[in-house]
């Protein structure tokens, strides 16, 4: 990955050099010499190990592409069979019945903290577009939220402040695979995860610890226990450097990759001194299913609207997560409701809310300890369901000993169809989201759903599979082929470019990228990696 050459500021740190390859004027309070020295030590201590783990991912994927299938590890059977539990969970995280997520934008942070949710996950990852300015502004916003000085005034003059008893703050840094090309150490690009984590804990960990509020984290995109162990070691070193007791930093891990579902016990064990739970990251999990099994024609999925949490492979994943977590004394968090309120159409809005209620009822009855929503208006909808069916703070006593899930049940594809509308919707969502992402927005409402990188990835991966495996048809027997894909993409590119949609000016660039990725012989690992090269 090329490093930008402009605006280079090189600072000495630990007898070496850390360089900032961007304009960071105004963020001197974030990128202090001491903070940059801290980042330098994190990079030197852990980047080689991170790169080795990413190489191991590629090796595993090559095995799947050659016909192999993911499975439970034989070398870790003793961990799965062992009688052990995670460390006690802090009081602030004992009740997580409703969590809200969103990007680290100032108004969003205030509204989320005031939403009535128990937890707010401030997101540097899938719902954020990682321009360097966005990442630094996010660090400022979180610091101000923690020290109590955050406020926001809208262009209309409306004042936003944080009320009493706000949601507990949990931060999601970027995944191990994502770079931060604007920061280099010894000429090497830093990991976005270490930049996000490092700046956040350096400036805020002591203040949060003094209030018994962590710091707390959500860890995304893990594929193996060794990747969890890397996070455990990063946090342990950070605690030592910041003079915090070992285990102060706590983590919830998103089980949002197919390989990870076969290592849930192992991931909990690797983080057993600081992990508090696992989360069903359903959208990324569906994407990972598609990506991991991209070479297996017998495991294609129907259009996204038919791949619900009630289909066997997702139901089995959810219930196995609950059983695994509760056996170890950890929380089992439910997944995201992507619906948002529909203004001006009461019937459509009620239908959307009914879907949310049904989804949350399924989760609480299955034994989940809490759930996610993407919009403040959905907090009371989800909370009413959990309050009615979970009068206690959590459901750790629901052990789900009735659940017995095999490897084949976790990778069983679901039946369904591919409609013209579903095919076209995938193209539109992928195009509009990518264009908005290139414009600096990572969380985009499209057709009354809150789309983020995960849902765009589902759309992209499905298009690639449907087109490259060949021979697929719509219900009317018309072929699904590249000619139709190119035609629909061109039409939507023109439409988006002429619209007032977010990122309209980037429609052509987004379309070119999507076309390249879709026509490529191999499904690319992540949309956000090549798109990042075009991000300011």
Image (spheres, rainbow, N blue to C red):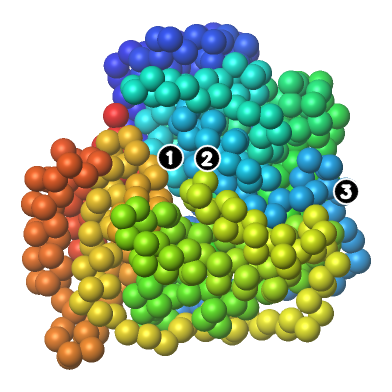
In three-dimensional space, the C-alpha distance between marks 1 and 2, rounded to whole angstroms, equals: 7 Å
Q: Nearer the viewer, residue 435 or 341?
A: 341
Kindly identify the residue that appears in the image at 62 percent across and 73 percent down: 362
Taking the image as shown, residue 370 lies to the left or right of residue 89, namely left
> Looking at the rendered structure, which numbered label has been put on residue 128?
1
In three-dimensional space, the C-alpha distance between marks 2 and 3, rounded to whole angstroms, equals: 25 Å
Element under label 3? loop
Establish if 136 lies above or below 313. above
Is residue 517 something one can see in this rendering? no
Do residues under tags 1 and 2 come within 8 Å of each other at their CB atoms? Answer: yes
Disc nearer the start of the sequence (1/2)? 2
Given the current orientation, which residue lies at the most extreme right position? 83
Q: Can you say which quadrant of the picture contains the C terminus? A: top left
Element under label 1? loop
10 Å neighbourhood of mark 1: few (<14), some, or many (≥20)?
many
Disc nearer the start of the sequence (1/3)? 3
Taking the image as shown, residue 75 lies to the left or right of residue 78, namely left
Q: Position of residue 165 (x, y in %)?
A: 71, 33
Kindly identify the residue that appears in the image at 64 percent across and 19 percent down: 148
In the picture, residue 76 is in which quadrant?
A: bottom right
Write down the residue under mark 3: 88
Taking the image as shown, residue 377 lies to the left or right of residue 294, namely right
Write down the residue under mark 2: 123
């Amino acid at each position: 990955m090329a490093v930008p050459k402009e605006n280079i500021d090189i600072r000495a740190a630990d007898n070496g050099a850390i360089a900032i390859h961007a304009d960071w004027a105004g963020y001197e309070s974030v990128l202090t010499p001491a903070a940059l020295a801290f980042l330098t030590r994190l990079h030197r201590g852990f980047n080689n190990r991170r790169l080795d783990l990413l190489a191991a991912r590629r090796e595993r994927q090559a095995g799947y592409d050659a016909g192999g299938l993911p499975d439970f590890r034989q070398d870790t059977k003793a961990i799965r069979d062992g009688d052990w539990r995670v460390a006690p969970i802090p009081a602030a995280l004992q009740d997580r019945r409703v969590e809200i997520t969103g990007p680290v934008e100032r108004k969003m942070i205030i509204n989320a903290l005031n939403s009535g949710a128990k937890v707010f996950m401030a997101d540097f990852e899938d719902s954020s577009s990682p321009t360097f300015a966005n990442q630094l502004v996010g660090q400022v916003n979180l610091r101000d939220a923690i020290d109590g000085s955050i406020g926001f005034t809208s262009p209309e003059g409306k004042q936003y402040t944080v009320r009493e008893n706000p949601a507990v703050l949990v931060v999601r840094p970027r995944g191990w695979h994502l770079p931060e090309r604007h920061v280099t150490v010894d000429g090497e690009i830093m990991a976005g995860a270490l930049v996000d984590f490092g700046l956040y804990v350096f400036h805020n960990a002591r203040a949060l610890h003094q209030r018994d509020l962590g710091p707390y984290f959500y860890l995304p995109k893990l594929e193996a226990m060794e990747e969890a162990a890397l996070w455990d070691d990063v946090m342990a070193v950070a605690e030592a450097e910041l003079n915090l007791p070992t285990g102060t930093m706590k983590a919830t891990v998103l089980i949002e990759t197919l390989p990870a579902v076969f290592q849930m016990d192992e991931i909990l064990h690797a983080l057993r001194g600081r992990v508090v739970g696992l989360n069903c990251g359903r959208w990324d999990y569906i994407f990972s299913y598609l990506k991991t099994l991209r070479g297996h024609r017998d495991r294609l999925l129907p259009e996204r609207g038919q791949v619900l949490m009630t289909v066997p492979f997702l139901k089995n994943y959810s219930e196995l997560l609950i059983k695994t977590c509760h056996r170890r004394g950890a929380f089992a968090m439910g997944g995201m409701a992507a619906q948002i309120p529909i203004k001006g159409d009461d019937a459509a809005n009620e239908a959307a809310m009914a879907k949310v209620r049904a989804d949350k009822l399924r989760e609480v009855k299955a034994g989940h300890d809490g759930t996610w929503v993407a919009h403040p208006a959905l907090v009371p909808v989800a909370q009413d369901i959990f309050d009615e069916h979970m009068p206690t703070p959590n459901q750790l006593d629901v052990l789900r000993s009735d659940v017995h899930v095999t490897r084949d049940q976790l990778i069983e594809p679901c039946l369904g169809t591919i409609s013209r509308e579903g095919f076209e919707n995938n193209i539109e969502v992928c195009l509009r989201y990518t264009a908005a992402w290139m414009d600096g927005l990572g969380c985009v409402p499209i057709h009354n759903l809150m789309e983020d990188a995960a849902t765009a990835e589902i759309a992209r991966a499905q298009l690639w599979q449907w087109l490259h495996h060949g021979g697929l048809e719509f219900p009317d027997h018309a072929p699904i082929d590249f000619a139709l894909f190119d035609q629909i993409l061109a039409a939507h590119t023109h439409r988006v470019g002429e619209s007032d949609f977010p990122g309209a000016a980037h429609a052509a660039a987004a379309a070119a990228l999507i076309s390249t990725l879709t026509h490529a012989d191999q499904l690319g690992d992540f949309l956000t990696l090549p798109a990042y090269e075009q991000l300011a």
